[in-house]
Amino acid sequence: MDLWFTENHSESVRFSIRVDKQLYSEQSEYQRIDVFQSMEFGRLLALDGYVMITQKDEFIYHDMIVHVPMAVKKDVKNVLVIGAGDGGTVRELCRYKTIEHIDLVEIDEKVIDVCREFFPEMTVSMDDPRLDIHCTDGLRFVRRKKAEYDLIIVDSTDPFGPGEGLFTREFYGNCYNALKNDGVLVNQHESPFYENDAKAMCRAHERINSVFPVCAVYQAHIPTYASGHWLFGFASKGLHPINDLDEEYWNNLGIKTKYYNTELHKGCFALPNYVKEMLSGAVQ
Ligand code: AG3
């Protein structure tokens, strides 16, 4: 029997991955959670039918969402991570000795449980003593925080369903207030390629831009996300993503990565013209 996982990348484009079997499926209080075993990508986690991680390409996403800000903002001590119940972002953060405390705010406890069971290599640091896990709404959690964090990482789903609130101006404003003076916000920023993703990307950028004085977008190639071309947002109260990159500092940390390096760091902020135009509001 031929079994395929299929995700709609647009109304008239579908992306399919051949799977051996379905390992898990459940409707949680917030979303549908599925785990499949695939031939090409290893295990795959989908939420509401959208690929969140596969064992083969998750390193790209997690390297880029963590190491880019960590090479700019030195001596990060206190971090807030929103979403990210799969553990990948926390795994990368826990490799930094300077980090003293991480608040992980994941709305859906089930995602954490399922990933602990099916993705042990992702959840290796979920019991790190520096980590506090809060199963609650990130929007609410960040509202009452003032000047506490050096870094906030928004590792959310897409801007519909449980992730919707994490793309609002109110949320970005609260993140601004929750950050210390030289703090950095990084978020998953959707894709510029298909129309609906591109609209979400433009909206997010506009809103972040209206709150933060420094605001840039960077890219990575993530094969299992729509179009394979995925973006991240970097925002800060002053630190510049390239001018304040300290290559020597980061390289001396000796953190071995499979995707990120400081050469790529400088390159990933160089965007194709059509993306630059969309972000500047010239094309919507
Ligand atoms: N976070 C979700 C990224 C967006 C995926 N969207 C999509 N496939 N349409 C991934 C969680 C990894 N920690």
Image: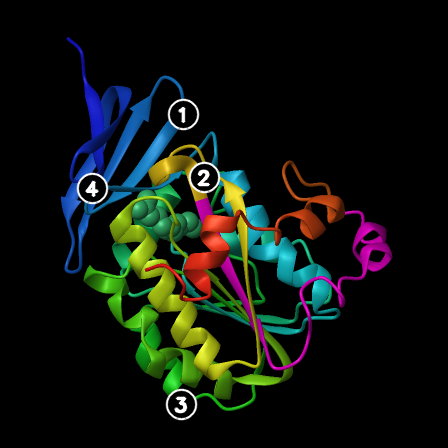
- Looking at numbered disc 4 in the image, what kind of residue is underneath it? Gly
Q: Residue at x 53, y 56 (%)?
A: 90
- Looking at numbered disc 1 in the image, what kind of residue is underneath it? Phe
Mark 2 residue crowding within 10 angstroms, few (<14) / some (14–19) / many (20+): some
Q: Secondary structure at mark 4?
A: loop
Residue 113 location in percent, x, y? 32, 50
Residue 11 location in percent, x, y? 16, 40
Residue 144: image tag: 3
Residue 120: image tag: 2
Residue 41: image tag: 1
Q: Secondary structure at mark 1?
A: loop
- Looking at numbered disc 2 in the image, what kind of residue is underneath it? Pro
User: Where does the N terminus fall, quadrant-wise?
Assistant: top left
Q: Which residue is mark 4?
A: 49
- As displayed, is residue 197 above or below residue 15? below
Disc 2 to disc 3, how far (Cα)? 33 Å
Does the segment drawn in magenta span residue 45? no
- Looking at numbered disc 3 in the image, what kind of residue is underneath it? Arg
Q: Nearer the viewer, mark 1 or mark 2?
A: 1
Chain-order first, disc 4 or disc 3: 4
Image color mode: rainbow
Query: Cβ of disc 3 within 8 Å of ligand 1?
Result: no
Mark 3 residue crowding within 10 angstroms, few (<14) / some (14–19) / many (20+): few
Q: Report if the CB atoms under discs 4 and 1 are less than 8 Å apart.
A: no
Chain-order first, disc 1 or disc 2: 1
Q: Residue at x 71, y 52 (%)?
A: 266
Disc 1 to disc 2, how far (Cα)? 16 Å
Chain-order first, disc 4 or disc 2: 4
Residue 31 location in percent, x, y? 17, 54
**Residue 86 visible in the snapshot:** no
**Residue 238 visible in the snapshot:** yes
Disc 4 to disc 2, how far (Cα)? 22 Å
